[in-house]
Every structure is written in structure tokens, then in C-alpha cells.
Amino acid sequence: MLVVLTKLHKKVPRRGKYSMKDDKIRPYSHTRVVKFLQKRMDEIKHRKSQYDIAMEAGYHKPNIISMMKNGDAKVPLEKVFILAKAFEVDPNILFRLALEQNFGQQDTYALTQMMNRTMTENELAWVEKIRAYTGDADPSLTQELESGLEKLLDNAERKTKTPA
């Protein structure tokens, strides 16, 4: 029988599979980066295995990818760029989610506020709304979306210029 050590170092027998919701066993399973990696792995599994991703990221064994994906291990900040390349995602998205996993949502928000100082408050509000609405999916600006956005902005501009 397999035995698991808890935080109090008591021996606890484990039967069958354990739940991902059990934060004592999988302490990072509740983080958004875990959900993001699980979803991404499902999207690319037909062309890349965890082994392939591990090798591309400089790991010798695929279990570390599994541990990150399941919430057993944190996504290391120093590996974000190479992991993003291996998972075929934008490194900025993975970095933001890894920061959140390492420092929490409030501290990450403060850090990203400081890093986004090239944007105005209004521009940042637009970007944050897009991120929230798409679930950090990073949609490309298609011709259709651009056309719709232009119409929306033209309409908003006319309303602000119309005398009351």
C-alpha cells in the first residue's frame, strides 16, 4: 500500500486516485496557470507528448510537466519563456499566470500595473476587459473583430461629440 506524508508528517494510507481538489496533496491545483496548462495540453496532445514538451523545456523526465499541469509543482519563473515555446503559447500570458501562482492575484496585479505603465489607465482597462472576457485566450485581431471595433469606437466618438 502506498503511503503519503501530510504536512504534519503523519503517515496516511492512500487508496485509489486522489482528488485534484485536495490542496494538501496538490497545493497549486486551484491556480489559473494549472487550468491553462491542462487546457493547452489537451489542445496540443495530438502532436506533442508531455515527453516532447519536457525535452523542449530542458527537462530530462516528463513527470515535471505532469506535476506542473496537475498542481503538484509551481511553474518556475526562470523557465517560463522556454515552457511557453514548448507549449506553443505567448510567453506573456504564461508569465502573468506563473506570477499569479507564485505571488498571488493581488501582488501580480500590482506588478503588472507597474509593468504596464506604457499604457494609459483607459488602455489598460480595455486590455484587462479583453483578458477577462476571453479567459486569457489572446485572440488575434481578425478583420471582422477590427471592423466591429471600429464601428463601436466611431459610435462612441459620435456620442461624446454630440452636444447635450
Image (tube, rainbow, N blue to C red):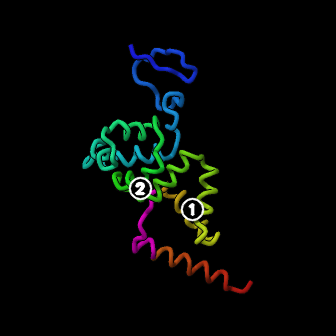
Q: In whole angstroms, how far apart are the C-alphas of marks 2 and 1?
A: 25 Å
| Range drawn in magenta | 137-146
- Residue at the spot 43% in from the left edge and 58% down from the top edge: 91
Residue 81 drawn at (x, y percent): 41, 55
Q: Nearer the viewer, mark 2 or mark 1?
A: 2
- Quadrant of the frame with the N terminus: top left
Badge 2 or badge 1: first in the primary sequence: 2
How far from the left and from the top, in percent, is residue 19? 46, 28
Position of residue 103 relative to residue 163, above or below, is above
Q: Magenta segment: does it hold 142?
A: yes
Task: Identify which residue is drawn at 40% across, 43% down.
Answer: 38
Give the residue type that dot 1 points to.
Lys
In the displayed orientation, state which residue is furthest to the left.
47
Which mark is on residue 81? 2
**Which image quarter is the C terminus in?**
bottom right
User: Of 66 and 61, which appears nearest the observer?
Assistant: 61
- State the residue at coordinates (50%, 78%): 150
